[in-house]
Image (cartoon, grey):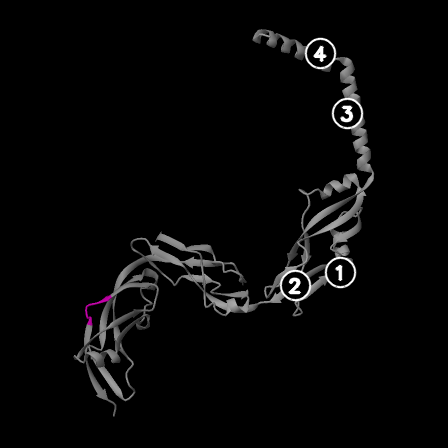
Amino acid sequence: MSESSMKTWLGHYFSKLKSFFISRDVLSFLLFLLLSFSFWFVNMLDKERETEIRIPLRYSNLPEQFDITKTNAQFIKVLVKDKGMNLFAYSEFRLKGLTINLNRILNDRGEVIFNNDELRTKLNKYLLPSTSILEIKPDSLILHYERLAMKELPVRLLGKIETAQQYILSEDVLIEPSKVKVYGPKRVVEKLYELVTDTVVITDLDKDIQMEVKLKAISDVRFSSSDVKLSVSAEMFTEKELFFPVNIINCPQDLIVRTFPAQVKLKFNIGLSHFNSVTINDVNVLVDYNEILKNNTGKQKITIQKKASFISNVRSDNEEVEYVIERKK
């Protein structure tokens, strides 16, 4: 058969088939078939039926100091009876987990059991009022748990903060809460000494900002708060000069070390809001007696310790001072 003959034959065949399906008798038959199926389906939905539904389990209000270590079931199977229409509510894509409240239930026994009657009571509140419970598998729910060790740890910011030109931090970076309680196995918790945040990078800061920062997760450890609030303040700065006393450290009690000069002038950048409030306590100028003993040259370099966040770029024209050592009378 040639290609043109084949096309003619197929066209004739489909034309006959089309005529058959759109004929009055066939359409009437299909309509009655659809109506019959609809009546049958409605009748089935109105009748009571039995079916098994699989309900996932969820737990709420688990006390921070406890952790579930083992359970005999992640879900429960329930054989129920109800009208077909109502059973549609239990289709898998509509079904939500059964939530079990653990508040004020756990203690130091390490195990809690929800028997069949308790599960039935919870399911009666979960299911439709018309639904009858025929069987529950497993017939009881067993949870094993342990009391966790607790420790309160300081939080350290991980990252860097850089201000814009002519700006300086006006206050210490504030982390709230500054300490967070952690719960976990004793062998893990006792090795922890601090918590750190996710890495934070702030550049060209020229205003006050606040942001939520997550704490870095630790395996098998739970936090009382999973994030902290970070507050950073920046303001424009100016330069200031001020005299600070030279302090001697590590000096024996029976000796006196006198330096010349007794005060040194420091230059530093300071936030405008703190210009008039800076004190000699905000910077330490130190000379270490132990270093004097090592060098024994009559002169000693000073060490500058900045104590206030609103001060930066501290410098002095005097890198060293002369000294004399006297014995107390």
Amino acid residing under circle 4: Ser
With respect to residue 322, does 34 lie above or below? above
Residue 19 is marked as 4
Amino acid residing under circle 1: Asn
Amino acid residing under circle 2: His
Mark 1 and mark 2: Cα distance apart in space: 15 Å
Side of 15 where 180 appears, left or right: left
Q: Which tag, 1 or 4, sits closer to the chain's start? A: 4
The residue pinned by badge 1 equals: 115
Side of 171 where 121 appears, left or right: right
Residue 34 is marked as 3
The residue pinned by badge 2 equals: 144
For residue 22: magenta?
A: no
Residue 109 sits in quarter:
bottom right
Q: Main secondary structure of the magenta part?
A: loop
Q: Position of residue 116 (x, y in %)?
A: 77, 58
Which quadrant: the N terminus?
A: top right
Q: Which tag, 2 or 4, sits closer to the chain's start? A: 4
- Dot 2 lies on which element? strand
Residue 323 sits in quarter:
bottom left
